[in-house]
Image (spheres, helix red, strand yellow):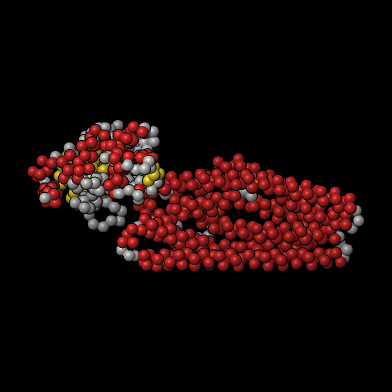
């Protein structure tokens, strides 16, 4: 949960200032937005002209028995209606164009910011909440832009225009309208104060439901394997019930507002009619004037009701705008450095490097680790579970920054690089690699978009994936399901390694990337890797003896500390932790 969520955040009132952080997305659309007021002014003017024309039909045509006047004024009414429709259509087009432009740019910026969040930031906000903000909240903000450039312009124009015309025609009839306005404003303000926390809570409940669905879908096999379907249904039911409860409360509140506003509107119109009847009885108003005044009064009340519903929508949109702005305002973690060039080579050096997880208890994940690996070397990183091996790779990738000491790639501290520049020189294969939905070739070209078919073939061959890809129905053009669910663990690892090789990296990081391979396939891969890596430095988290033997040197970690560094033979001679690791491997082999 990020700052501003929860009870305190939910109690905040909607304010126009909530939209200020998003104004930069509106500026590129100002050209379209500028076209909306003239078009809407034309539509409102034609609507305001209709009661005056109806007055003339009644007074000059019906009362005088002039069919010619009725036809002439009727044609003018048709022309006004056509002009009004033209203005309304033009305003709808430009407002829609502006709104969709804002939504598109906002989604792009939000997606880019989400992709730049650290694991800690993403975990604090939650995957379900991020998805809700990216889709639902952006759509709410987009709808506000459309509303603000169309109907939010129309209502004030009709309101003030109608009031002015009523005052000009019969000012005493405006008294009921002026008395009703404060009542309508009070109802709207009261609704907004009660509705905003409910809108906030409803979005939070939607976040929780989305997060649960994401967890359930990703862990569907675990749920089925441990027969937890009943518990999952129960949890989903509770979360769904909470969302429904809040939605019903906010819906009932909105349902109560509508009839209240309609009642106030009808009372005001009845007051106008009674006042007009009195004026007519004294001979102060003609029938046509009464009809025109009643129509203008109706437009006044409808405009007030329209503005009240817009205020309701703004209250809901303000919640979405705050949630979107909260993500956009998250600082870069880790922050970018000033070096925009990629590392000149893949050499790696750690100088007293250490890392402690924020708020973590116990010993640091890494502490006072120092070693240097020349460019083009093969370093294996060994150690027991929890010794800090994966954390070391995270520091090289700048997924995390060292909390002490320095980490250098290409002779430059990684903190100084821009993240994109650093990672452009790195190929990374996780133990549980993620494949994207699309074809095999599209997944491989995620490493380098301009890779040729021949380069893809070489990478697949080196990764020992060529044979099973060729056996797929369309070869490299065969589709891969989301996450690579249609492939085995070993196949996913080999395709991920091929993707990393396609990139032609200067530094290749392998996080236990052959754990799902059989021994024969792993040996073939290790033989092909030096040539396929093209002189890249390879840093491989390894558990198997075959990888340790293939490496130029091995770094041994134990509880976050470097307890050995050297060749296989050197470590056997002086490092007890390494001897235990090798002995365990040999016992398993025997």
Residue 571 place in picture, x, y as percent? 12, 43
Which quadrant of the view contains residue 171? bottom right
Residue 207 place in picture, x, y as percent? 44, 58
Q: Is residue 505 left or right of residue 578?
A: right
Q: Nearer the viewer, residue 186 or 110?
A: 110
Q: Is residue 342 left or right of residue 4?
A: left
Above-or-below relation of 121 to 426: below
At x 21%, y 52%, the residue is 385
At x 47%, y 51%, the residue is 134
Which quadrant of the view contains residue 269? bottom right
Residue furthest to the left? 573
Q: Is residue 553 left or right of residue 394?
A: left
* Quadrant occupied by the N terminus: bottom left
Residue 430 place in picture, x, y as percent? 29, 46
Q: Is residue 578 visible?
A: yes
Q: Is residue 186 visible?
A: no
Above-or-below relation of 361 to 494: below
At x 68%, y 57%, the residue is 303
At x 81%, y 48%, the residue is 76
């Amino acid at each position: 949960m990020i700052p501003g969520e929860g009870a305190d955040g939910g109690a905040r009132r909607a304010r126009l200032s909530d939209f200020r952080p998003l104004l930069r997305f509106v500026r590129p659309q100002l050209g379209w937005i500028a076209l909306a007021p003239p078009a809407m002014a034309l539509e409102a003017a034609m609507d305001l002209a209709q009661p005056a024309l109806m007055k003339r039909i009644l007074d000059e045509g019906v009362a005088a028995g002039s069919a010619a006047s009725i036809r002439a004024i009727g044609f003018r009414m048709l022309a006004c209606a056509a002009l009004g429709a033209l203005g309304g259509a033009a305003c709808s087009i430009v407002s829609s164009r502006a709104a969709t432009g804002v939504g598109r740019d906002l989604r792009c910026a939000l997606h880019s910011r989400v992709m730049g969040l650290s694991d800690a930031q993403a975990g604090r906000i939650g995957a379900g909440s991020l998805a809700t903000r990216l889709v639902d909240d952006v759509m709410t903000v987009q709808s506000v832009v459309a509303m603000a450039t169309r109907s939010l312009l129309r209502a004030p124009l009709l309101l003030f225009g109608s009031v002015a015309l009523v005052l000009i025609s019969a000012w005493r009839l405006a008294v009921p309208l002026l008395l009703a306005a404060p009542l309508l404003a009070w109802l709207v303000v009261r609704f907004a104060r009660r509705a905003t926390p409910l809108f906030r809570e409803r979005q939070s409940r939607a976040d929780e439901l989305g997060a649960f669905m994401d967890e359930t879908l990703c862990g569907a096999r675990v749920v089925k394997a441990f027969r937890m379907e009943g518990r999952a249904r129960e949890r989903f039911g509770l979360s769904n019930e909470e969302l429904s409860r809040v939605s019903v409360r906010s819906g009932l509140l909105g349902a109560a507002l509508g009839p209240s506003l309609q009642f106030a509107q009808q009372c005001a119109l009845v007051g106008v009619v009674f006042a007009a009847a009195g004026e007519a009885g004294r001979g102060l108003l003609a029938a046509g004037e009464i009809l025109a005044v009643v129509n203008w009064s109706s437009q006044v009340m409808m405009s007030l009701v329209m503005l009240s519903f817009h205020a309701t929508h703004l209250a809901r949109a303000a919640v979405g705008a705050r949630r979107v702005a909260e993500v956009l305002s998250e600082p870069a973690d880790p922050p970018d450095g000033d070096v925009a060039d990629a590392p000149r080579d893949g050499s790696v050096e750690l100088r007293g490097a250490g890392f402690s997880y924020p708020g973590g208890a116990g010993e640091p994940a890494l502490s006072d680790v120092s070693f240097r690996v020349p460019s083009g070397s093969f370093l294996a990183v060994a150690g027991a579970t929890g010794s800090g091996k994966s954390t070391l790779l995270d520091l090289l990738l700048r997924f995390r920054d060292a909390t002490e000491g320095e980490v250098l790639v290409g002779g430059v501290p990684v903190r100084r690089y821009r993240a994109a520049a650093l990672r452009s020189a790195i190929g990374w294969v996780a133990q549980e690699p993620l494949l994207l939905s699309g074809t095999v070739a599209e997944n491989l070209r995620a490493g380098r978009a301009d890779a040729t078919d021949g380069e893809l073939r070489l990478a697949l061959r080196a990764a020992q994936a060529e044979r099973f890809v060729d056996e797929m129905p369309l070869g490299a053009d065969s589709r891969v399901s989301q996450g690579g669910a249609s492939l085995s663990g070993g196949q996913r690892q080999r395709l991920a390694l091929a993707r990393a090789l396609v990139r032609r990296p200067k530094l290749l990081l392998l996080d236990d990337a052959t754990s799902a391979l059989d021994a024969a396939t792993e040996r073939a891969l290790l033989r092909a890797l030096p040539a396929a890596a093209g002189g890249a430095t390879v840093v491989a988290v390894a558990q198997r003896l075959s990888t340790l033997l293939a490496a130029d040197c091995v770094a041994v970690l134990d509880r976050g500390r470097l307890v050995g560094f050297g060749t296989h033979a050197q470590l056997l001679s002086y490092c007890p932790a390494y001897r235990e690791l090798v002995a365990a491997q040999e016992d398993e082999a025997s």
